Image: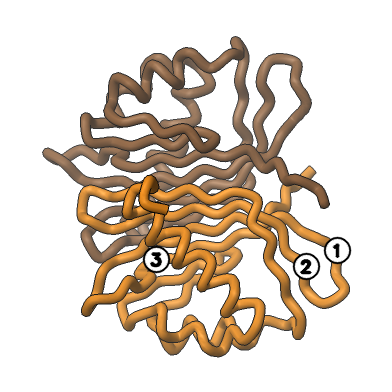
Chain colours: A orange, B brown
Amino acid sequence: MGDKPIWEQIGSSFVQHYYQLFDTDRTQLGAIYIDASCLTWEGQQFQGKAAIVEKLSSLPFTKIAHNITAQDHQPTPDSCILSMVVGQLKADDDQILGFHQTFLLRSYSSSWVCTNEVFRLALHNL
Amino acid sequence: MGDKPIWEQIGSSFVQHYYQLFDTDRTQLGAIYIDASCLTWEGQQFQGKAAIVEKLSSLPFTKIAHNITAQDHQPTPDSCILSMVVGQLKADEDPIMGFHQIFLLKNINDAWVCTNDMFRLAIHNFG
């Protein structure tokens, strides 16, 4: 763990925490967002912690499991951390679907919060 | 065009330009990066315009075509633009594959440059 750059440690720690929370009780995700946070979920925009948590809590499934295939982290010029996740998910008894998600993390009052998040299912128009 | 937020106009304009350049002559992509730019390509890290252009130029295909399925753009607190692209690509005579890419754009000296770029093919380990 000591060999990895700090942004990779912070990024992967955040990603692990995010999906663990999401898969067990996504109503608890509020702490990672602030009022300036933006979420784009399958093309729909949500602004601020309250609106984001409401959207995530109201997603129409009971069971959800994410499996991360790959994650990449980079430091940005403004001292933020940019994380990209590619993986697969299974909601209730639906088929397994690929997904793509991005997080921009910022240090805020001694913790790392998510100011920008984008989620898309990997569905293509064949 | 007047209805879309400015970050969406800039982001989609950049994305269109990037893939057009990539698909016609990717050795010309240098202008969109700076010395502080980072690229992560399939898990490998590249730092700075020169290293990035060298990596992209040396990718082992002659023909490449990207097809964008969806793109999303957001403004960041530091006045940057975050763009995420999901799409499919075809290299030479290989099968069509899904890909995921993100760009972080920053305005430097009145031009939008890419400071962070990440690319992954949508290949999953089954089981």
Please give the chain letter of the residue carrying mark 1.
A
- The residue pinned by badge 3 equals A116
Please give the chain letter of the residue carrying mark 3.
A
Residue A67, placed above or below residue B19: below
Residue B1 seen in the current view: no
Please tell me whether mark 3 or mark 2 is closer to you in this view. 2
As rendered, which of B69 and A59 lies closer to the eye? Answer: A59
Q: Earlier in the sequence, mark 1 or mark 2?
A: 2
- The residue pinned by badge 2 equals A90
Residue A39, horizontal then vertical, whole percent: 46, 71
Residue A74, horizontal then vertical, whole percent: 36, 47
Residue B75 falls left or right of residue A26 = left
Number of labels in the image equals 3
Q: Are marks 3 and 2 in contact (CB under 8 Å)?
A: no
Residue A11 falls left or right of residue B65 = left
As rendered, which of A83 and B102 lies closer to the eye? Answer: A83
Which residue is at 82% across, 52% downward? B127
Where residue B17 sits, quadrant-wise, is top left
Q: CA distance from mark 3 to mark 2?
A: 24 Å
Q: CA distance from mark 3 to mark 1?
A: 28 Å
Residue A26, horizontal then vertical, whole percent: 59, 84
Q: Are marks 3 and 1 in contact (CB under 8 Å)?
A: no
The amino acid pointed to by label 3 is Asn
The amino acid pointed to by label 2 is Lys
Residue A35, placed above or below residue A87: below
Which residue is at 72% across, 64% downward? A89
- The residue pinned by badge 1 equals A95
